[in-house]
Image (tube, rainbow, N blue to C red):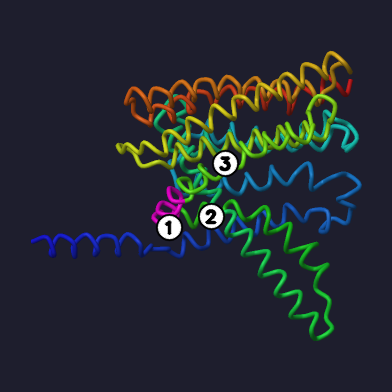
Amino acid sequence: METADSEKENSIDSQEGTPHISLTDFLTIAAICIITGLLIHIPKITGFDPFATNYYVSNTGIIAFFGLIAYSLFSGIKPGGRWLLFLAAVFAASALFMNLISADMNDQAYVLACIHLPLLMWCIYGMAFTGFDIRSIGKRVAFIRHNGDMAILGALIVLSGMLFAGFSIGLFESIDISTEKFFTGYIAPWGVVAAPAVTAFIIHHFPRLTGKIAPIIATLFSPIVLFTLIIYLLAVIFTGKDPYSDRDFLIMFNMMLLAVMAIIVFSISESPEGTKRRFSELVLLALSVVTLIVDLIALSAIFYRLGAFGPTPNRIAVLGSNLLILGNLILITIDLFRVTFRNAPLGQVSLTTARYLPWYMLWTIIVTFGFPLIFQV
């Protein structure tokens, strides 16, 4: 009986692992890739210099998320007409805004808008992913988990693309044909904007592919990141480096903070539901506490620099981001303490993060559209 059940389970797994990709599915993803490729190559098609207007910097995020959201709408819940109009208005307004404001890389407000616009597009993608059921906390949690899968598979696709490009360039170089400019000028930009939609396509048809890998990576990486972070903080103390006087060090400090915060959220979202893993929970709690300390150090350095050198768009943006992260970290740490010592369900942490997402969206809107209008006047 047990053998029969096992064979039946294996049969089901085998069937689920064999996706059915229809001709419509294939033509849809092919059309999305072609459209995103044409959009990113508008400068080459029309004949203007993309670097003079910072076309790639301003528009790559918009085009990439356009393809991703288009595929999400095809493969997921079909929204009503008003939501389609909303999406069209968001993309049109974002494209017009980013291409009409001063495209000066020395302008902090413009650079901040370029950095935060993809984050805003990510929030819009989250709305589309949930079928615009934006009040559903459960669907927000599913979106967070989906992003972990996207990050893993997307990284593999990007690395594979780089390997293929390097191999192809070397192959043609061996017969004295230079293809480096062709790959960097045409294939690479196309690949960047098409990769998110292709990643979502693969996850949609191979859901078990990343579902098995993600929890393993989350379990392995959390202790390694915790150990590395502790060693790093000790090294900072002994080397005398500090974020108060060194601007570049403060930037790296904040980048590290964002990366570790993402790892914490990813590890929690990818943990199996309904299971108690004492070691993993202790590691996540310790990691959140250490990250909280890092954020407090970064915030103190930001306040110091604001008092010493005055406000700038960069300092205000970093201050707002760190305050948001601080609030989220405090809530996560409290939840992880309850999970570890009071047997609360780990899923509560994901629910807390999901409820916090609108605050991130609000801040990205302010920085993307508000800062250029305020500081470029």
Give me the residue at 43% from left, 38% from top: 142
Q: Residue 153, labelled with which disc?
A: 2
Mark 2 and mark 1 residues within 8 Å of each other at the beta carbon: yes
Residue range highlighted in magenta: 204-216
Q: Distance from label 1 to label 3 (Cα)?
A: 29 Å
Give me the residue at 38% from left, 63% from top: 20
Which residue has dot 3 on it? 227
Give me the residue at 71% from left, 37% from top: 235
Left or right of residue 234: residue 127: left
Res. 93 visible in picture: no
Looking at the picture, how far across and down is residue 97, in whole percent? Answer: 78, 32
Q: Main secondary structure of the magenta part?
A: helix
The question of residue 206 being in magenta is answered with yes
Q: Distance from label 2 to label 1 (Cα)?
A: 9 Å
Q: Which residue is at the front of the view, 91 or 154?
A: 154
Q: Distance from label 3 to label 2 (Cα)?
A: 25 Å
* Residue 229 versus residue 323 in the image, above or below: below
* Residue 230, image quadrant: top right
Secondary structure of the residue carrying tag 1 is: helix
Q: Which residue is at the front of the view, 44 or 54?
A: 54
* Residue 174 versus residue 123 in the image, above or below: below
Secondary structure of the residue carrying tag 3 is: helix
Q: Earlier in the sequence, mark 2 or mark 1?
A: 2
**What amino acid is found at the position of numbered circle 3 in the picture?**
Phe
* Nearer to us: label 3 or label 2: 3
Q: Residue 209, labelled with which disc?
A: 1
The question of residue 326 being in magenta is answered with no
Left or right of residue 83: residue 103: right
Q: Residues within 10 Å of mark 3 (few under 14, many from 20)?
A: few
Q: Earlier in the sequence, mark 1 or mark 3?
A: 1
Q: Residues within 10 Å of mark 2 (few under 14, many from 20)?
A: many
